[in-house]
Each structure stands twice: as C-alpha cells, then as structure tokens.
Amino acid sequence: MSKIGETLGKNLRALRRAKGLTQEILAELVEVSPSYIGYLERGKKKPSIGLVEKIANALNVTLPMLFYSPEQFGNDELREFIGFLIDKDPKHIRLLHETHGL
C-alpha cells in the first residue's frame, strides 16, 4: 500500500464518517460500488483524478484535504490541531476563526 493511497484512504473514511455518510451513500453520490469505496478507504485501489474530484465534491471538501497528512508538519501541537480540524465542517472552522481569532 502506497503512502499516498494510505493517507487518501484514512482521510476518505474520516471525512465520510464526519459527514454522516455510509459507504453506500457516498458510492451512489460518486457513481461507484460501495465495495470500491471500501477498497479506496483501505488503500487497495488507486482512483482516477476525476473520481477523487467527485469524492471531494460529494464530501464538500477541497482536494488537498483528501491528501493531507499530519506528518507533513514538524510541530507536534500544530499537527494535533490540524488533525483536529481535518474532519470539521468548513463553516464551523470559519465560525471558530471569526469568534475566537484562531
């Protein structure tokens, strides 16, 4: 399993669950089988860029969020904070920023 595939799969699963979607519902939204979503989440399949874009749109996230890895950042506190934000709704993040200046 490649590092990119592993990261994509982990993020896909976390974001899908955070949005309250089952594999079946996400599969229907992006026009693939539920088992294919499972393969993606386990890093067993490599999706096309077009499918990754469909998934990002269905989850209402940016493409980079699907490939984000906390290990990219050196500071432990920053990694932890970004990891906390990864599955949050962008509206909630904006609200946090506006009300608390974060």
Image (cartoon, rainbow, N blue to C red):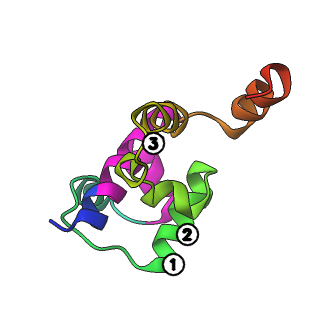
Q: CA distance from mark 3 to mark 1?
A: 18 Å
Q: Quadrant of residue 5?
A: bottom left
- Please name the amino acid that badge 1 sits on: Gly
Q: Quadrant of residue 99?
A: top right
Q: Secondary structure at mark 2?
A: helix
Q: CA distance from mark 2 to mark 1?
A: 5 Å
Q: Position of residue 15 (x, y in %)?
A: 47, 42
Q: Secondary structure at mark 1?
A: helix
Q: Residue furthest right?
A: 98
Along the line of sight, which residue is nearer the eye, 76 or 60? 76
Circle on res. 26: none
Q: Position of residue 86 (x, y in %)?
A: 51, 40
- Please determine whether, in this image, residue 95 is positioned above or below residue 42: above
- Mark 3 vs 1, N-terminal side: 3
Q: Position of residue 65 (x, y in %)?
A: 52, 54
Q: Report if residue 60 lies within the magenta region.
A: no
Category of crowding for the residue at label 3, using alpha-carbon neighbours closer than 10 angstroms: few (below 14), some (14–19), many (at least 20): many
Give the residue number, with chain letter if any, for mark 3: 16
Q: Is residue 30 left or right of residue 3?
A: right
Q: Position of residue 73 (x, y in %)?
A: 43, 49
Give the residue number, with chain letter if any, for mark 1: 50
- Please name the amino acid that badge 3 sits on: Arg
Report the magenta residues as a range. Answer: 7-31
- Please determine whether, in this image, residue 29 is positioned above or below residue 76: below
- Please determine whether, in this image, residue 90 is positioned above or below residue 62: above
Q: Report if residue 15 lies within the magenta region.
A: yes
Q: Is residue 78 left or right of residue 9?
A: right
Pointer 3 with pointer 1, Cβ within 8 A: no
Give the residue number, with chain letter if any, for mark 2: 53
